Amino acid sequence: MAGDGHMVPELDQEKYDADENVKIICLGDSAVGKSKLMERFLVDGFRPQQLSTFALTLYKYTTTVDGKTILVDFWDTAGQERFQSMHASYYHKAHACIMVFDVQRKITYKNLNTWYQELREYRPEIPCIVVANKIDADLKVTQKNFNFAKKLNLPFYFVSAADGTNVVKLFTDAINLAVSYKQNSQDFMDQVMQELENFELEKKVEEEEEDISDKEEYDNHLAKPHTA
Amino acid sequence: MAYHAKKCGIRFQPPAIVLIYKEQAKEKDRQRIMPVRNFSKFSDCIRAAEQLKNNPRHKQFLERVSLQQLEKLCAVLKGHLQGQNLTESLQKIQQETVLDHDEDLNKLDDKELKKRKSLMDKLFEKNCKKKDDPEFVYDIEVEFPQAAQQESCGWDDGSDIEF
């Protein structure tokens, strides 16, 4: 469940509900250059926060969008991607996703499928950008046609973390997409998920109540705080 | 001092790096034999290469020989000491210095993944524009027009994308 995020105590994900906070996640196979892209975008301003217990690196960035200050948290994997799956809390409350593959390695392109499916399981509606990294290795790839993004109607960028091509554009666009998603989305699935969570909570409380009333007196039952 | 390195090789017995070079303003090629000392089948090739490169007596001759080449020659020597023939040694070196683009890096442990990443870093460093480079530009936007993307990447086979 996406609600698992609450189980991670040091990670306050409640803040992502505040208007000025957005969360952008990076996905993709090992060694496609996710961290290198982050570092190129943040150049000297990067102070990554390593959360090794969660195999996770956080990069903080402050910017303005339409005159408003926006605090961005970029979430980057730190080895967890090796299991070709991320913990639910990674996706929890994310407002946009940057999905990266390495133009030199077919398998990283093929695996976009798996990443995308998992993303959509947790975040059915958030904007997702597909990124072809390492074009500096062979510029000819930029004349080729990569169908994955086109089929899914997703924005697609050719970038190079090494020489910097389109890196700033990618991140600026991702932030704008995240902010506008947050402001405008009447994300139906989000609401459904929320309802489901509430529903499950209520159900749990009810079950507890039943358990208790089986064993204990009615008074005791009333005194029990209704938390799950 | 200009010594122009022309060729660099290895001698197994006794172990030595052999350099063919030309001295500036002189006609003839010369040969220099530089012993590789205290080297065993357990030695670290990177360290051995560094020692040669920093050796005050050889330094100026090896200026134009890359550390990678010396490292590779030491690896051939090491292979020989381990009883491999030349073809086997070269194959092994090839595997360790050339990235296999079809390998699934998700399946490697930390140590192996680190090795592959350091191979990739070579290309990265080569093409990298650092922020203190006078030519560094922070925001570089390049349009790659879709109209020019005629050829397929060859990685889409239609059936496996089910969305």
Image: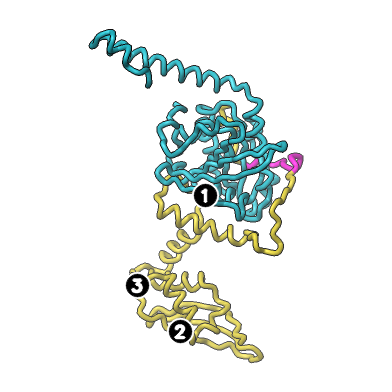
In the picture, measured across the screen, residue B132 lies left or right of residue A89, that is: right
Residue A184 at x, y = what percent? 66, 25
* Alpha carbon distance from label 3 to label 1: 45 Å
Q: Secondary structure at mark 2?
A: strand
Q: Quadrant of residue B12?
A: bottom left
**Residue tagged 2:** B34
> Residue, x 46% and y 48% (percent of image)?
A50
Labelled disc at residue A48? 1
Q: Chain B's colour?
A: yellow
Residue at position x 59%, y 26% in the image: A125
* Disc 3: host chain: B
State the extent of the magenta-drawn residues as a range.
B145-153
The amino acid marked with disc number 1 is Pro
Q: Helix or strand or loop: what does disc 1 sit on? A: loop
Are the residues flagged by discs 3 and 2 in contact, CB closer than 8 Å?
A: no
Q: Are marks 3 and 2 on the same chain?
A: yes
As shown in the figure, which amino acid type bears the numbered disc 2?
Met
| Pointer 2 chain | B
- In this view, A21 is above or below B69: above
In the rendered image, the vertical position of residue B151 relative to residue A163, given as above or below: above
* 10 Å crowding of disc 1: few (<14), some (14-19), many (20+): some
In the depicted view, which residue is nearer to us: B154 or A22? A22
Whether tag 1 and tag 2 are in contact, CB under 8 A, the answer is no
Q: Is residue B121 magenta?
A: no
3 or 1: mark nearer the eye: 1
* Residue A145 showing in the rendered view: no
Mark 3 residue type: Leu
Image spot of residue B80 (x, y percent): 37, 71
Q: Which residue is mark 3?
A: B81
